[in-house]
Amino acid sequence: MVSVSLDISLFIQILNFLVLMLVLNLFLYKPLRKILHERETLFESYREMADVAKKQLEDGEEEKARSKEEALTVGLETLKGLRSAGREREKEILAEAQESSLQRLEEARARLAKETATVRSSLEGEAQTLATDLASQLLGRPV
């Protein structure tokens, strides 16, 4: 059987253990806990910064989508305006072309009528001369 005697060495060992715990606590455990606490605080601040950055990114994406939608709306409105202006300009050009062609047609008709009258009068004069020449040849005497 084991016998335990309580002598002074047991108390010295207990005292040695307590002194060792006090020294370890002072030089090892407290600085280690302090470093771990600082690390935890640092990681928490990094998490908060990451959350803020994530929120800013989401806000930026929303703003980008909103800007894109606004730009698309403005672009479509501009396109409608340009198409409308193009149609109006097309109508103006067609009206001008039609007016110009009608004016040319009238000028051509007037020129044709004038030339026709000139040719007709010259042909009437020649027809009169031919008729006179023909009649004089048929009758055998000058008319």
Image (cartoon, rainbow, N blue to C red):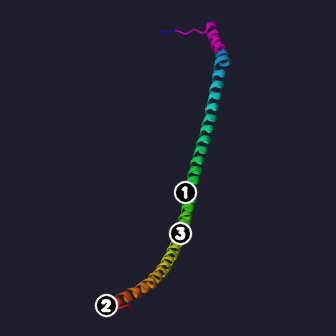
Which residue is depicted at the point 62% across and 31% down? 40
52, 1: nearer the viewer: 52
**Alpha carbon distance from label 3 to label 1:** 31 Å
CB atoms of marks 2 and 3 within 8 Å: no
Extent of the magenta region: 3-20
Task: Indicate whether residue 122 is drawn in magenta.
Answer: no
Q: Which residue is mark 2?
A: 138
Of circles 2 and 3, the one toward us is 2
**Mark number, residue 72:** 1
**The label number, if any, that marks residue 100 in the structure image:** none
Relative to 36, residue 126 above or below: below
Mark 3 crowdedness (10 Å alpha carbons): few <14, some 14-19, many ≥20 = few
Whole-percent x and y of residue 7? 62, 7
Q: Amino acid at mark 2?
A: Leu
Q: Earlier in the sequence, mark 2 or mark 3?
A: 3
Q: Is residue 112 left or right of residue 71?
A: left
Q: Earlier in the sequence, mark 3 or mark 1?
A: 1
Looking at numbered disc 3 in the image, what kind of residue is underneath it? Ile
* Above or below: residue 84 compared with residue 134: above
Q: Residue at x 52, y 9 (%)?
A: 3
In this view, the mark in front (3 or 1)? 3
Label 1 Cα neighbours within 10 Å, binned few <14 / some 14-19 / many ≥20: few
Task: Kindly identify which numbered label has been placed on residue 93.
Answer: 3
Q: Is residue 75 above or below residue 114?
A: above
Main secondary structure of the magenta stretch: helix
- Residue 70 placement (x, y as % from top left): 58, 57
Which residue does the image show at 56% across and 64% down from the upper left?
81
Q: Where's residue 93, x and y in %?
A: 53, 69
- Secondary structure of residue under mark 2: helix
Residue sitting nearer the eye, 142 or 12: 142
Closer to the eye: label 2 or 1: 2
Q: Quadrant of residue 73?
A: bottom right
